Image: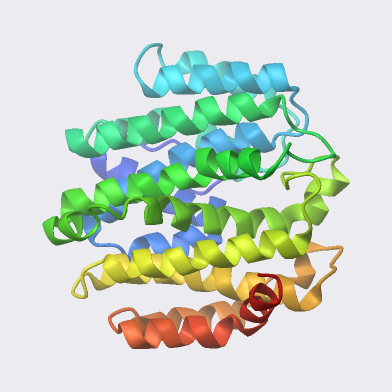
Amino acid sequence: MNSAIHPKENPNSDLAYQKAILGSVSRTFALTIPLLPPAVEVVVGNTYLLCRIVDTIEDAAELNPAEKQNLSKLFLEATLGVIPVASFVNPCLDALRGYSNVDELDLIAHTPTVLRILHTLPDTDRTAISRCVSIMSDGMSHFHNRQSQAGLRDLGEFEEYCYVVAGVVGELLTSIFSNYSPEFAKRIQGHEQLAIAFGQALQMTNILKDSPADRARGVSWKPAQMSQTELLKIAYEKLQDSMSYISLLPENEIGMRRFCFLAFGLAVMTLEKITSRKEFSNQSEVKLSRNSVWIFYAFTKIAAGNALLMKSFFYMASKQLRKLSANNT
């Protein structure tokens, strides 16, 4: 179990737990979330952990769709304060007795800690988080029954899936960033769709990267009857919208720009690897090396405040994607 288990009920130990468990359940987000301004870091970190609990239920291969739906419903009710949190935690840990990821189990055991932090946040942030978790939880429940080897019905259903698991997170980030930066709140008006594309681009990257592992457990989140090439082309269009989204963040908000640009850049480099490989049977074949990640992390320090550098990176790092897109228009 995680080293920071069973903190006492006080704000400092709760926040220490949030920071510690974040590093255990996600290497990527443990890298990106601390780049945010401190107040925003707490809100986004808390949101990520809530979403991760929903994800853990979703990923549990030993649960059938009905069990997943029931646990998702209990989690949402606990988050919204409809039922005591123990009414979710106990049956969830019981159902996941054979689950192998001890850090994710530890996070579920500490749902009360995560919810205590949620209740210390400003009302505007809390409302936005509740909306996000509701859409994600209900959306995933809807898709639990649609898991199959054949994949999702069509592109529309694929985009809807990407919205409920990630596009809605783009909307949430926009709300949080707008609460923190009045300048961004002005700039994003009329361009809210870009926030959804940003979340969807990251999710499409994950779906393509994880497809061999999903296939091995008899699941596909790709739309049936659509080729890898067509999906990569759509993902590239979403990346273009993502670049526009990041460019709307004020130049002086370096933390928020680095947070988004780092996630964006890792997605670009991963999709470029997938495009150049065409076929791959294991996620490790398209995984970025730790060295690549750290070099890009260092690059974001220089590039995040400079629109030309960010766009130059995108242009240089997406040669195969761009070529594929041009050949299939």
Task: State the residue at coordinates (73%, 55%).
Answer: 210
Residue 173 percent coordinates (x, y): 34, 50
Whether 178 is drawn above or below 268: the answer is above
Q: Is there any visible trace of residue 83 in the rendered image?
A: yes
Quadrant position of residue 112: top left
Task: State the residue at coordinates (37%, 68%).
Answer: 244
Q: Is there any visible trace of residue 259 in the rendered image?
A: no
Residue 312 percent coordinates (x, y): 44, 88
Whether 167 is drawn above or below 117: the answer is below
Please state the total of marks drawn on the protein image: 0
Q: Nearer the viewer, residue 309 or 28?
A: 309
Q: Nearer the viewer, residue 26 or 180?
A: 180
Whether 115 is drawn above or below 169: the answer is above
Q: Going by the image, does 257 lie left or right of 78?
A: left
Q: Nearer the viewer, residue 304 or 234?
A: 234
Q: Going by the image, does 223 lie left or right of 205?
A: right
Q: Nearer the viewer, residue 78 or 14?
A: 78
Quadrant position of residue 100: top right
Q: How is the image coloured?
A: rainbow
Residue 182 percent coordinates (x, y): 12, 56
In the rendered image, the residue lying farthest to the front is: 329
Task: State the residue at coordinates (69%, 76%).
Answer: 324
Q: Quadrant of the N terminus?
A: top right
Residue 236 percent coordinates (x, y): 58, 67
